Image (cartoon, rainbow, N blue to C red):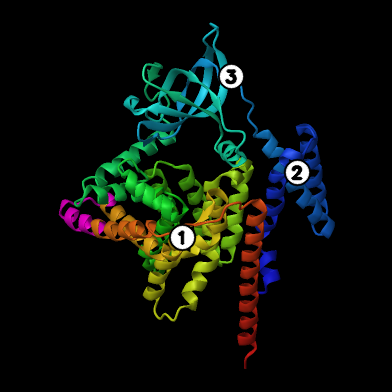
Amino acid sequence: MLLSDKIAVAPMVRLAVPLVIGIVLSDSALAPLWALGIAALLCYALGWIMFRSPVGGAYIFGAVLISGIFLTRLHRTDNVLPAGERIIMSGEVVEIPVESGRWSRAKVRITAFLPESDSVWRKADEALVLRADTSYHLGVGEQIGFRGYFNLTDSTNMRFTALMKARGVTGYSYLTRGNLVSRSPFVHKSAVYYAAKAQGWAVERLMRLGGSDESRAMAAALVAGDRRFLSREVRDDYSTVGASHILAVSGLHMNFVFVIVNLLLALVTLTPRGHIVKNGAVVAAIWAYTVMAGLAPSAVRAALMLSAVQLSLGISSPRNSYNILFGAGVVMLFINPYYLFDVGFQLSFMAVLSILFFLPRFVRWLPLRGNFARKAASALLIGFAAQVGIIPILAYNFGSIPFLGVLLSSIISLTAFLIITVGLVWVVAPVSFMAGATGWLVELFTTIQNGVISLTATSPLAAVKVPGVGGTGVIITYLLIFALCLTIEMWEDSRHQKLSTRP
C-alpha cells in the first residue's frame, strides 16, 4: 500500500489537524459563541452535501476547525470565588489525595462559598487544588467545609495556567490545622471512590511481599500508582535523570500491561473465535489495571488510546491503529479541548504514537529469529521507542533532555516491566508460598533499577539543559521527526514494490 493510500484510509488523522488548529486559535476568535455554532453547522451541512468533491473536504476542514474554537470557548471557566479573600468553602474531594511531606494534595470541586463578611451562601462550580495538612487524612468522595483563601493560578506562567485549565482547575487553597469547618465522609460514592478502594486493596497486598521496604515501595508506585512510601532521595534521583514518569502510572505502564496481556493470551487466538476473546480480555485487563491505579487521569487517557489500538488490531490491519489512536484523541479533545495543553495527554499520546511507529521497526531491523526473541525485544525496546516521541515535550516543559535517561531507557523500562509483571502476578494470586520468590524478584529488579538511576543521577550528562526551547522549536523538531518517519515509510514502500515486482 502506497503512502497516499495509507493516508486516505486514515480520516481521523486528517480531522485531528483542523481540530488542533481551532483549539490553538480559540483565544484569537472574537465572534460570539452563537455565531461560531451557526458557522460550524453550516460548514458541516455544506460538507455533507458536497462530500465527494474537493470543496466538500474544505468545508469539513473548516467545520472541524470552527468546532475546535467553539468547544474551547465553551469550556472556559469564569471565576466566581473571590480571589485573595478569606472565605468558607464547601465542596467534595473528587480525586485521590496524594501525600508529599506535610501536605496532601487533592482536587476539590467547590459547590458553595460564604464570605466572612456576609451571612448568605452563594453557589459556585469551580475546581481547585487543595493542599491539606496530612493530619486530616482526607479521602475521595468526602464532603468538606473549610476556611481559607482562594488563590488564582499563576497567570504569568502561561504553560502552568494552560495545564491547570486542562485539568479543570481555576486556583488553589490551603487547609491548615483548625480551619476544617465540617466533614461528611463519602456521601457520593463515585467511580473514583471505588477505584481508591481497589488501589488500597492492591497496595495492601503489595506491602505483604517479602524483601526490603524500598522494594515494596517501588512495587506500590509502579504497580498501583501509590508513591507515598518512596523516599525523597529516590524521587530526586528519578527526577534528575528525567525518569519521574516511571513512578506514576501513565501511558508507559499501560503499554506494559498491554504487552503483558497480549503475550499471555497469544495462544488463545488458536481457538475458535479466539481473536474476539483475546481482544476483549486485553481491553478488560487494561481497564481493570486503570481502576486499580486509582483512575489516575493519565492512566484513563492511556487506557482509552490503547483500547482503541487493541480494537484496531482486532478489526483488521495494524494500519488502522493510527486511525483509531487519532480517533480516540479527537474524541477526547471534543470532550475537553484543554486536554491539548495537558502535559500528561501530550506525553501519553506521543508515547503511544511513537511506539506504534518505531517499535515494530526497531524489532524488524534486529537480526532476530523466532517469535519469542521478537517479543522479548519488544519488551526491551518499548521504553526507547516511547522516548523518541516525547523528547521535544520534555525539553519544552522541563528545559532539559534526559540524555543518559534516554540511552538507559531500555534497561529502566525492562526492570520496570519485570517489577510490574511480578507485582501483578502477586496482586492477582497472593499465595503465601509465592511471597518469598516474588519478593526476591521485586527486590532484585528494584536494586538494579535504583542502582542504575542513582549512578546516572551523579553524572553531568544525566540531563542536558536546553534552555529557551519554545513552541516554535518544538514544532520544528516534530516536523523533522515527521520528515524522518515519512522517509522511512517511503523507503519501505519502495522496497516493498521492488520485492513484489521481482520475478
| Residue 336 found in image quarter | top right
Mark number displayed over residue 276: 1
Q: Quadrant of the N terminus?
A: bottom right
Mark 2: which amino acid?
Ile
Provide the major secondary structure of the magenta segment.
helix
| Mark 3 element type | loop
Q: Is residue 44 above or below residue 359?
A: above
> Can you see residue 140?
yes
The magenta stretch spans which residues?
427-442
| Mark 1 element type | helix
Residue 315 point in image, percent of width and height: 54, 62
> Can you see residue 260?
no
Residue 10 point in image, percent of width and height: 65, 61
Mark 1: which amino acid?
Ile
Distance, label 1 to label 2, CA atoms, is 39 Å
Distance, label 3 to label 1, CA atoms, is 54 Å
Residue found at the very far front of the displayed protein: 460
